[in-house]
Image (tube, helix red, strand yellow):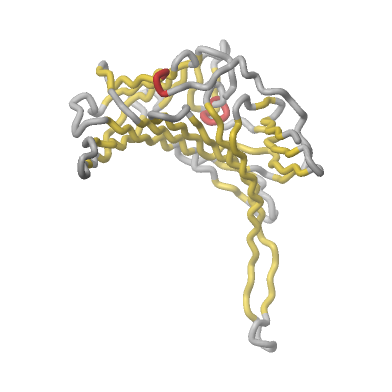
Amino acid sequence: MGRYFRFNTNTFNFATRCDVTWRKEYFTEFTFGGARDQRIYGLTRVTPSLTCAYDMDGLKFLQYVLGTISANEATISVGDLPKISTIHAGIDYANENAGILNAKIDTWEFTVEEGNIAKAEFNAIGKDTTTIAPTAYTTDFNSSPLMPYNFSVTINTSSIDFNRLNLRINNGLQAIFKTSTLPVTLRPTGLEIEGRIRVPNYITDAMVDGSLRIVCGTIGTIDLATCKVTEIPVKAQGYDLPETEYSFTAFPLGTTQAIKVHLQNTILW
């Protein structure tokens, strides 16, 4: 029994979970002139969405999240969201397949934590559903996902020791239905970039407002123009080591975009 997840004509090396949802909304209202449960209804909207979790071994997928990639495919920056023709998953048993069509990425986030492999997750919203079976493929095990020791974080010029890092990009997609039950337009609103970094001590003097760079091993770097620390919750309990998990929000700085991604390999995921 095979299991496959295809993104356009591309495949994930280490996709670990896929959730497909076709959410249906009905209008309903009660009417006079009938029994206690007398009411009418009608299908108003169907929102196809898909969530995928995967182990990170590349950053090129962020071109679908942010929208623009340089001609030499070395830098990804903020732009219009490109359209994806098909995202679908399949289980090669009794033709069990489900997916979405003409989709855009709503959110993407990755998490690095001690004791775990580096994982990313994205959510996409589509304009239609599909049950077409994805083409079979073989995972490339020559490419290895990243481990926590592959990452480093620098704020301004100061290196930060951390035991957990999370970064989330939200395009704020709005599905526009007009007179259709399926979305006719997927409209991105304001770009939001937020993150949390947990440090193994109470307060680190290096965790201040400023530019932030995340070095992701040999796959590339993520640069945030300026980050504002928004929350500093200090925690200590019993004999546990005290720690602080800082929350931050990324903003553009002058004409510099809030985020840019510099690639060091061509692996999509």
Query: Measuring 31% from the left and 30% from the top, which residue is drawn there?
Result: 227
Residue under the image location 47 percent in, 27 percent down: 118
Q: In which quarter of the image is residue 33?
A: bottom right
Q: Position of residue 197 (x, y in %)?
A: 32, 32
Picture coordinates of residue 185, whole percent (x, y): 63, 44
> Which residue is at the far front?
239
- The image shows a total of numbered marks equal to 0
220 lies above or below 198? above
Instruction: Indicate left or right for 47 with 226 as reference.
Output: right
Q: Nearer the viewer, residue 247 or 95?
A: 95
**Point 76% across, 36% down: residue:** 1
Residue 30 place in picture, x, y as percent:
63, 79
Front residue of 256 and 166:
166
> Which image quarter is the C terminus in?
top right
Task: Choose between 179 and 90: the one closer to the eye.
Answer: 90
Q: Residue 53's image quarter?
A: top right
Q: Is residue 165 left or right of residue 129?
A: left
Decide which of 179, 154 is in the foreground and name it: 154
User: Does 257 appear above or below 124?
Assistant: above
Check the image and name the residue furthest to the right. Answer: 94
Query: At x 68% / y 51%, what residue is drawn?
Result: 182
Give the x, y percent position of residue 165. 37, 31
Placement of 269 over or under 246, stated as above or below: above
